[in-house]
Amino acid sequence: MSKEKINLNILGMTCVNCSNGIKKFLNKVEGVESSQVSFASSEGEFVIDTNKISKEKLIEKIELLGYAVEEDLKHLEEAQFLAFKKLKNLFTISILLTAIIFILVFTQVVEESIKKYLIFVIASIIQFYCGSRFYKLSYKAIANKNYDMNVLVALGTSAAYFYSTLVVFIPNLFPEHLKFLYFDGAAVIISFVLLGRYLEERSKQKASDFLKKLMTLTPEFANTILDDGNIKSVKINELKIGNKVLVKSGEKIATDGKIIKGKADIDTSMITGESMPVFKQEGDEVLSGTLNTNGIITIEVLKLSKDTTLSKIITLLKSAQSKQIPISRFADKIANIFVPTVIFLSILTFIIWSLLGDVQNAILASISVLIISCPCALGLATPIAIVSSVSKGAKEGILIKNPEILEIIKEIKFAVFDKTGTLTKGEISVTNTNINKEYLPIIGSVEKLSEHPISKAIVNYIANENIKMNLEIDEINIEIGKGIKAKVGKDTILLGNKKLLEENNIELLDNHIDIYKKELEKANGVILVAINGQTVGSFSLEDKLKDEAYELISNLKKINIKPILLTGDNKITALKIANELNITEVYSEVIPTEKYEVIKKLQEEGKVMFVGDGINDAPSIKQANIGVTLNSGADISKDAGDIILINNELLSVSKSINLSIETIKIIKQNLFWAFIYNALGIPIAAGILYPLWGIMLTPMYAGIAMSFSSVTVVLNSLRLKFKKL
C-alpha cells in the first residue's frame, strides 16, 4: 500500500455541515484512509492509498458533491470573498423585503384588492432568491443522508409559502375560515437564518486575514554581500544557507542567521515577547521578522526562507486554524431525526383522515402539521440569542468575533496568560531613582537624543517631574548594548549598565552597588549614571502589572480555572510576576513554537483559554480553544483571536465567561421550548383531539402557534441585554 497526504482547497462550503458531509462521504470511499475537512479554512487534508484512488479521482468525488476544488490559493480567496459578499447582500435584501411585508400586513398603505398579490411577489423573491441556498443545501444534505437545519428551513418555509400561494390564486379550494396567508412567517425564518449564516461566514473570512499580515513581517528583499564585496538585493526565497546578508539600522531581519560582524540591539518582541531590545553581537543568532533598532550587522544565513522561525509560526497558525472546534450542533442533530419524522407524520395524517373519509380534513391537517412544525423557533433559537449576546458583550467592551466559542468558554480548565502587555502594562517605566534632582536636566537632555525604549522611559520620568531638558549636547556616542556616553559643556556623563562604567574606569560607590544588586534581584532593570568619573545613582526600570490583574486571577481561581503564566521573558522576571499574582505554574523563556506546544499539551488535560496581545502570541491564540486578545495588541493577534477586549480591561475575561454561561443557558431554553412546542403542537395539528372534543387545529391557528413560539424565543433571548455580568 502506497500512502500519500493530499491538501486541497475546497470552494462552496457554506456551513459546518458542508465540511462534515464531505468528510462523511469520502470516509466511505475505497482508498481514502482518512479525511479532515475544515469549514473555517476551506481546506481538506486527505490520506489516500494511491493504488486504489488517485488525486484526480478524489477531486472528482468532491466535485460530484457539488463543490469545487481550487488549486490556486489566490483564486480561492477571491471566490470566498465574492460568496461572502453575495451572502451579505442576500441577507440585506431579505430583511428589507421582510420589513416591507410586515408594513403591508399591518397597515392600509395599499388597497386590499391588490395587497395579497403584492405580498406574494415580495415573498416569492425572498423564498426563491434569498432562500435559494437552503434548497440547494437541502439537496446536498439529503443526498448525503444528512437531514440538517437547511432541510428543516426549506421544508417549513415551503409549506407556509405554497399554502399561502394556493389561498391567493385558488381561494375556492378553501372554506372562508381557512383563507389565511403565512408569507410573513416564511420570510422571517429565511431572514434570521441568513443572519446566522452571515455571522458564521464573517468569522471565517476574518480568520485568514492575520496570516496575510504575518507574512508581511519578513521583508521581501535582503541585501546580500557578494564575494567581491558588492551588495545585491535579492528576494528572500533566493537566499541560500551560507549567504551573507547586511542588515542596516531600522531594518527587519530577513532570515534566521548568525551575526558574523557588528553588534546591535534587536527588538524581538514580536517573536519572543521580550519587552526590552536584546543586545546581540558576533556569534549570536537572530530570527527572521525581528527588528534591528540600531547598529549595522552582517549575518550568515542559517535557514532557508521556508524553514525560518517565522515560517514555522505561519505553518502552526494554519494548522491551528484548520482544527475542528468541538461545538455541539444540537439543533442539527435533532433535525436529522425531526425532519423525517415530520414528513412521515404529515403523510400519515393525510392517509388516516382519508381512510376515515374526510379528504378536506386530510389536506388541512397534513398542511397544519407542516406549518406548525415550521422551524421558526428552531431557526431563531440560536441566532437571536447570539445577536443579543454579541450586543451585550460589545456594551461591556467585549468584541466576540466567533460566536461559536460561547459554547465552550464555560468548559475552560486553564487560563494561560502572556506577560508583556497582557498582565503587565507593556511599557518600560522608571519606578524610582536615588539620583539628586540637580542632575536630572543634564541626564534628560542626553536621553532625549536616543530613541531607545529605556531612554524614552527616563525622559518621561524626568518630564513628569516638570524639569526642563534643554541643555546643548556637545558630543554623544551610543554604545550598543551598554548605554550612552556624552559631553555637555565641561561635564562627561555616562548612562548605562555596569559594563559601560567599568570599561570607562568609573569607581562605583558601595551604596550604589548595593542598590544595583537589590534591583536586579527583584528582576528590575537598572541604569547607572556617572558624571565626571563619579557615580551619582541609578534608575530602576520595571514593566508594571495592570491593576485589575490581581482581581482577575483571584476570580478565575474561585471558579476552578487554573491560571498559568507563559512568556518569552526571562525566568527571574516571570517568577516575580507569578509570585505577585499567586500563579503557581510558570513557563518562561519560550519562543512562539514552544508556546504553541505548551498549549497543545495542556489541551490533553482540558480546554484552554489563552490571553495575549503580541504577534508572538498569534499561534497560541489560534491553537487554544478560546483565544482572547487585547485591543491594544498587534493587528495579527487581534485577527487570530476569538474575543477582543476593546477596553483592554482584563476583568472582561471574567465577564466573557459569565456571558457565555448565560448565553448557552438561554439557547438551551430556546431549543427546549421549540422542541416541546413541536412535540405538543404536531399531534394537535394532526387532529388527535378531534375525536374527543371536536378540536381541529386549522392552518391559521397553526400559524399563530408558530408565531407565538417565535415571539417567546425572541423575548427570552432579549433577557441577555439586562443580565449583569
Image (spheres, rainbow, N blue to C red):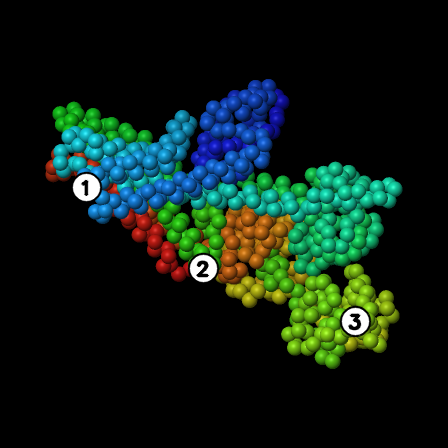
- Name the N-terminal-most of marks 2 and 1: 1
Mark 3: amino acid: Ile
Asked if one can make out residue 285 in the rendered structure from this viewpoint, the answer is yes
Q: Nearer the viewer, residue 219 or 289?
A: 219
Residue located at (52% from left, 47% from top) = 625
Q: Report the Cα–Cα distance between label 1 and label 3.
A: 88 Å
Amino acid type at circle 2 is: Glu
Q: Does residue 122 appear left or right of residue 600 in this picture?
A: left
Disc 1 residue type (three-letter): Glu
Labels 2 & 3 near each other (Cβ < 8 A):
no
Mark nearer the N terminus (2 vs 3): 2
Which mark lies nearer to you, 2 or 1?
A: 1
Name the residue rendered at 43%, 39% in the picture: 87
Report the residue at 20% width, 33% height from top. Answer: 167
Q: Could you tell which of marks 1 and 3 lies nearer the N-terminus?
A: 1
Residue 598 seen in this snapshot: no
Q: Is 722 displayed left or right of 214 in the figure?
A: left
Give the SS element for disc 1.
helix
Residue behind mark 2: 396
Give the CA distance from mark 2 to mark 1.
47 Å
Q: CA distance from mark 2 to mark 3?
A: 50 Å
Q: Position of residue 651 (x, y in %)?
A: 50, 61
On screen, residue 141 above or below 477: above
- Which residue has dot 1 on it? 112
Q: Nearer the viewer, mark 2 or mark 3?
A: 3
Q: Secondary structure at mark 2?
A: loop
Which residue is disc 3 drawn over?
Answer: 473
